Amino acid sequence: MATKLVFDGDLRLLENKTIAVIGYGNQGRAQARALRKLSKARVIVGNIKDEAWERARADGFEVYSIAEACRIADVILVLIPDEVMPEVFKKDIEPSVRNKEFVVVDFASGFNIAFGFIQPPPNADVVMVAPRMIGAEIENLVEDGRGYPVLLGVAQDVSGKAWEYAKAIAKGIGALLPGGVGVISSFEEEALIDLFTEQFVAPTIIATFITAFDVLTQEFGVSPEAAILELYASGEWSRIFRDMAEIGFFEQLRLHSTTSQYGQLSRAMKLYLNGELRNRAREVARYITNGEFAREWILERMAGYPVFRKLWKTVKESRLAQEEDKLFKALKRR
Ligand code: NDP
């Protein structure tokens, strides 16, 4: 297991290089600012001409069109939304790097390479440095001199140093500061665990909360206010999830009463052992790995997001959303 973990990278690989951060959103802003602080590279930004462009200028970066930034760069960090990436890559990035002798192209997620939506040019090392952290939190951590986890991958290694570039970028964006770690992974593994967490773990939690709210309030006379505060609005779960990460998944249970520990463990083990969840987990993982989900999502986008919009309408009109609205207004959270 220890061989999968990376704690250092050689920043000299980025010295005197021009790094173009393409996209100045959640990840782009955090990674560009960390690189400027931690590496000796020239960090420039490539963006469409909009608010993000202005923000990058205000933060003191040289800002160029995406095509121009890629023409200038030795290392390109592609940090635009995954769904627009294939088109932007084909139109603005690939033509700008095609005639270079060599370029490093870095992605923060595995999706487009893993499912073949982007074909990298043959003169590029293609690496992945995928933070397990939102951009704003990366900024806070780097400010405090602390690192965070990243998954590392290599899809194409023309220089023979692609893994070293991935580690150097991880170090440059602050991931390998104390407390942080890189994990040797792959574009495919990152795409799978990212989508799997979104499509198996999160839906199980969401469906459980809605069901709990319905049954408690409609069948057992619990008030919506009490149910919502108990289920999530108190913020207790954020504390529990932080304790899982810091103390340990099971060890944090000791902070709860013995009645609670017994109730949680006895019922969880029953669910775990009956096999139904495991079958659903397998189904979700298979649907992702065989490319079915990627196809479903592309078709949904091509059709103009009809199902996605309907899902949002359904949840916004649900009893839970409406009761939450009343409660949050009373609590002045809205
Ligand atoms: P954001 O949506 O925050 O920002 C993307 C940037 O791309 C913005 O500057 C945006 O400009 C620009 N952009 C949007 N549409 C286009 C377009 N059609 N053409 C050109 N530029 C465009 O993205 P994230 O930072 O969330 O995601 C970037 C990458 O990082 C993705 O691969 C994602 O999977 C990965 N990632 C994201 C994490 C996160 O915390 N969000 C965590 C880990 C990985 P504007 O805002 O002006 O439209």
Image (cartoon, rainbow, N blue to C red):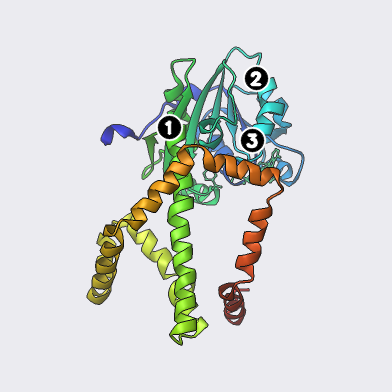
Q: Secondary structure at mark 3?
A: helix
Where does residue 144 sit, x and y in percent of width and height? 45, 49
Q: Residue at x 50, y 47 (%)?
A: 138
Q: Give the spatial CA distance, label 1 vs label 3.
A: 19 Å
Where does label 3 land, which residue? Answer: 85
Where does label 2 land, which residue? Answer: 97
Is the C terminus in the top left, top right, bottom left or bottom right quadrant? bottom right
Evaluate whether residue 171 shows in this view.
Answer: no
Is 190 placed above or below 124 here? below
Q: Residue at x 30, y 56 (%)?
A: 275
Q: Give the spatial CA distance, label 2 vs label 1.
A: 23 Å
Q: How many marks?
A: 3
Residue type marked 2? Val
Residue type marked 1? Ser
Q: Secondary structure at mark 1?
A: loop
Q: Give the spatial CA distance, label 3 vs label 2.
A: 16 Å
Is the N terminus in the top left, top right, bottom left or bottom right quadrant? top left
Q: Residue at x 64, y 43 (%)?
A: 299
Where does label 1 land, which residue? Answer: 186
Is 307 or 231 nearer to us in this picture? 307
Q: Secondary structure at mark 2?
A: helix
Where does residue 265 sit, x and y in percent of width and height? 25, 66
2 or 1: tag closer to the N-terminus: 2
Q: Is the residue indicated by label 3 positioned so its CB lies within 8 Å of ligand 1? A: yes
Q: Whereabouts is ligand 1, in terms of quadrant? A: top right
Is 158 or 111 nearer to us in this picture? 111
